Image (cartoon, rainbow, N blue to C red):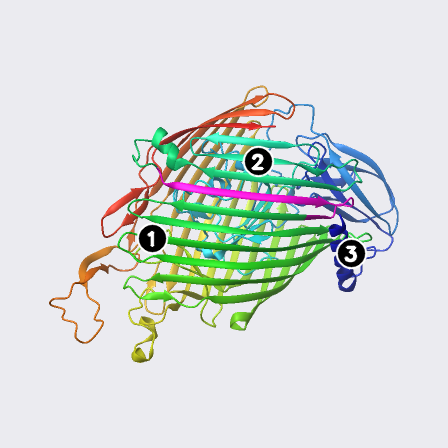
Amino acid sequence: MNLTKGISALLLIITFFAVPTGPLLAQNGSIRGFIYEQETGEPVLFTNVYLFKTSIGATSDANGYFAITKIPPGEYFLMVTYVGYDTLKIPVTVKANDLQSKKLYLKQSTVQLSEINISAAHQDKVRETQTSIIKITPKEIQSIPSIGGQPDLAQYLQVLPGVVFSGDQGGQLYIRGGPPIQNKVLYDGMIVYNPFHSIGLFSVFDVDILKNVDVYTGGFGAEYGGRLSSVMDVTTRDGNKNRLAGKFDISTFGAKALLEGPIHKQKNQDDFSATFLLSVKNSYLEQSSKIFYTYIDENGLPYNYLDIYGKIALNAPNGSKVNLFGFNFSDQVQYKVLQDYNWKSYGGGLTFLAIPGQSSVLIEGNFAFSNYRVEMVETNQSPRSSSIAGFNGGLNFTYFFGKDALKWGLELSGYKTTLELKNSVNRTIGGDPQNSTEVAVFGKYKWMFGKFIIEPGLRFQYYASISAASLEPRLAVKYNVAKTFRLKMAAGMYSQNLISTTLDKDVVNLFYGFITSPTNVLQKCNQVVLGTELDILPNLSVNIEGYYKYYPMLTTLNRNKIYDDNNENAKIPDYYKKDFVYETGDAEGVDFSVKYDYKKIHFWVTYSLGFIHRNDTKYTFVPPYDRRHNLNIVSTINWGKRNDWELDVRYNFGSGFPFTQTGGFYEQIYFANMGTDYTTANGSLGILYADYNKGRLPYYSRLDFNVKKSFFLGKTTKLDINLSVTNTLNQQNIFYFDRITYTRIDQMPIMPSLGISFSF
């Protein structure tokens, strides 16, 4: 409690010098506050708060916070409406120059609704620009087939328009022509460098502790930076404030446990509270597959992971709060042909939210550190390893002016990277550890003008390690042509200093190393997105977005390196001796999405068409993640008096990824000295590679379904039984291919699974 007050006082001082904290406009009043669920004390996200019989209102944010300003003095009724909860209606008196604070609690509705509403985003279509952003809630994640009864964010992300996954195994996220290194993943404000496990059906995130997920597939605002392609912002719940609660899952794939509850129980609405939350999940597929899936491999499926996440939330009476969290994630694969692939990640940090006493300004901050290391050992190949350890922190201020809002903030981050690997001609790439520090300042303003929503922004990013600065303007615009038809666009300039390393000797890329760009040239990307939203029927909507990305500068691993970069090879062109080279390129495409929601039926179709081009000053080529076509079809049906039955079906089709074909083999002899006799020397097996990425892997196809039955054992107690089938058509999708032994490993075959979940 003292910590919360101390942070609030410090932030109030900062705000006082930055912007006046008095009433926003004379002669008008303001109402701010938080909306919570009465049963758990968790905030209610993205719900309408308005003054009855007026157009004055707001929408609660990811913290349940709302601020209504520019209210003429008078008598009103403040109303809150949200699906599944009783409508709240309370009288309020607004006075000139007066600021009122409210804590509103919603009760779950006692009337069972026949219609299932799994998205709260519809009400924001005419209030937010919403270009290239998908807001995801746990209910939506649970609406697609879940493996063993355990829904996972990784499975949901695969169906988003513009998103391409590398498959069931080794799942990596490619968004609109960008590799994984260009995606920024934030977990409660902390940077996570690899959120996906080797078995691509699962991520490090536990769906049952998630509060909200925002996925920006392009054109993101000035509040995000340091990445060229996308942002995934994941936030977690605080934990139940009123009682001890939990959930236990067990399936043929793995197990999961969640425990949460109050440390200091809230005695009344104006009391301090503290909660805890602990999540543990793991895979024992290597062991269980020897029992349930003996037809695959007598040695089992060697996928092992363990994810632990803990959180303590301290909540002040006025809504200010401090969250402390920590995590430990690990992943390991041991195939005979692959030998060993594993990564480990750990870290922790804090976030805080402060509400000054006499202003509707919202102050948010965070500080965190994390460490990630990946290693890969292959048959007849040199080991590879990479690590990245760093910190990030920030301070954000949001001010509300009627329907308009101003947000600005500061960010500081730094990290250290190491890399050890050899390229296709056995030349070492990596060297000494690299360090980088980044400082950023940003600001953006949302302005609602008639039918227009205009959101300009500006970000200044400074990279200390290379003494480079980047001024990055951003702009998002929406025009509400009609109530059911909207046009939108987003554009911006982006920069990045972190790069990844993959090798052309890999038919399928599993290893992604991290390294700070060793040159003084900053990677940059300029992009524009144009789109339209059409509500054909109240329950049927269409979203179409076309995008273009131009990369004036990229730094990448030099796959053409033959010689060592030393004085003896001074006359050799850099193209054949430098570890890294520069590239230019572009990416363009169209994302198409159709959603239908009516009563107990949910239907969603997404299709993406994309093209990627790269040029390294000598050759024009496509990167290994260039997938031309990607189609997803998802359907959910609920039935029963209490919607206690659910059927989920998902189908995914993707055209083949590019890869470099094998031209032949030869005996490779290294002439260590001038006396080497090539007629008697014993060399190693060398590989002749064909033209870079001219081949295409087979197409990818997978059909999944699951059936779930729920048993309501009490007011807060429920038992779920889930039967699912992964890869129902038993499609053979390639996972890994060893060029030397000509051994192929496929992704998941047909795999039925049974899961049981108990929550209390």
- Separation of residues labelled 2 and 3 (CA atoms): 34 Å
Prevailing secondary structure of the magenta residues: strand
Q: Whole-percent x and y of residue 646?
A: 51, 26
Write the residue at 31% across / 37% down.
299
Nearer the viewer's eye, disc 2 or disc 3? 2
Amino acid type of the residue tagged 1 in the rendering: Val
Q: Find disc 1 in the rendering and name its residue.
A: 377
**Mark 2 packing: few (<14 Cα in 10 Å), some, or many (20+)?**
many
Spatial separation of the CA atoms under disc 2 and disc 1: 34 Å
- Nearest to the eye among marks 3 and 1: give it: 1
Judge left or right: residue 732 versus residue 637: left
Kindly state the secondary structure of the residue where label 2 is placed: strand
Label number found at residue 258: 2
- 618 in relation to 408, above or below: below
Residue at 60 percent of width and 46 percent of height: 235
Quadrant in the picture for residue 558: bottom left
Circle 3 — which element?
Answer: helix
Q: Which mark is residue 9?
A: 3
Q: Quadrant of the C terminus?
A: top right
Q: Position of residue 549 (x, y in %)?
A: 47, 59
Instruction: Determine the image quadrant of residue 445.
Output: bottom right
> From which residue to which does the magenta span run?
301-322
Vertical order, 736 against 395 (above or below): above
Q: Is residue 715 left or right of residue 492?
A: right
* Amino acid tagged 3: Ala
